[in-house]
Amino acid sequence: MDKKLQLTVSEGGERVDKYVAGEVPSLSRSQVQDLIARGLITVNGIEVKPSQRLKEGDSVGVIVPPAEEVELVPERIPLRIVYEDEDLVVVDKPPGLVVHPAAGHQRGTLLNALLARYPDLPLDEEKRSGIVHRLDKDTSGLIVVARSRDAREHLQAQFKAREVLKVYLSLVEGVVEPRNGVIEASIGRDSRDRKRMAVVRSGGRRAVTEFRVLERLGEYTLLETRPRTGRTHQVRVHLAFLGHPVVGDSVYGHRKQRLGLERQFLHAHRLAFRHPSSDRQVDLVSELPPDLERVLEMLRRPNLISAEEWERLGPLS
């Protein structure tokens, strides 16, 4: 069933697409523009263009069609399992693997692979089948999946209480000073681009990330980062806010400084939590994958090849 909203403009002057994206957080600006093109957003009952400026008192009608139904199809995709028992499984996710199916990307995800290997995974209302946290598509490393409803609830409670230890390895631009510290800055939707997150002064959610310098490599720094909260893109946003974006991050960093990478240098290196049944500590580590390790080798041996020459060679195969 369509969702219908009626909004009244309290202050004029804003574009209708920007206004609706700001008032309806579940919609990105591009989604709003698509709804406008389909005639599903009106101003005072009249169809409009995205660029139309609103006036105080205007009535904006928004019709949001139901989300496309996602079909969960088991697929035999190879997975690297680092821990497995009857309660849970921990996967070492490769870069490029999307975690959850979504409209327009329903196949080839981690969940499709898990359903083929574990057909009895518990299915929640969001069809996440035991996946209790997430990693970005191009972030590699450890992710835990519950194999029963009780285990899922137990793990979810640990994440909510911030009892799970998550450690990331990240190579960032610049020389980070001091050698360790804490970034505490609220994160919310970027007002200029609803698909991005940003550090915001108001309206965001509290976010805390600890960091420690592991190695300085010329114009770059290898960091250990520990997010104490679980906001979307938290590590990437916080490090960019610090002035040291993650190398290869095309969203929050500099497109030219990629060092031959086809993705951001961010790896979920360590994951520790209490086992749902025995309450014993499970502490697992994933070493850097080859594409990230090669970048460090290049930076540690600057006489072998310069960073500039590495860029000219193109992406690693």
Image (spheres, grey):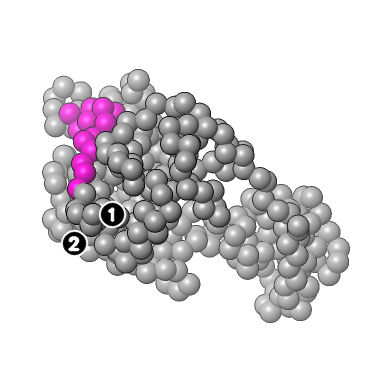
Over which residues does the magenta segment extend?
A: 283-297
Q: Single out the mark in the foreground, 1 or 2.
A: 1
Residue position marked by numbered label 2 in the rendering? 181
Q: What residue occupies the far right of the structure in this picture?
A: 46
Seen at 18% across and 62% down, the residue is 181
Is residue 285 found inside the magenta-colored segment of the image? Answer: yes
- Residue 277 is marked as 1
Report whether 31 appears left or right of 52.
Answer: left
Q: Secondary structure at mark 2?
A: strand
Report whether 22 appears left or right of 37.
Answer: left
Seen at 75% across and 65% down, the residue is 4
Q: What x and y, as percent, mark residue 275?
A: 26, 53
For disc 2, the neighbor class at 10 Å (few under 14, some 14 to 19, many from 20) is few
Q: Secondary structure at mark 1?
A: loop
Of residues 258 and 272, the one nearer the viewer is: 272
On screen, residue 47 above or below 86: below
Q: What x and y, as percent, mark residue 173?
A: 27, 45
Q: What x and y, as percent, mark residue 200?
A: 43, 67
Is residue 91 found inside the magenta-colored segment of the image? Answer: no
Mark 1 to mark 2 CA distance (whole Å): 35 Å
Seen at 41% across and 49% down, the residue is 148
- Residue 96 is marked as none
User: Which part of the image, by quadrant, shows the N terminus?
Assistant: bottom right
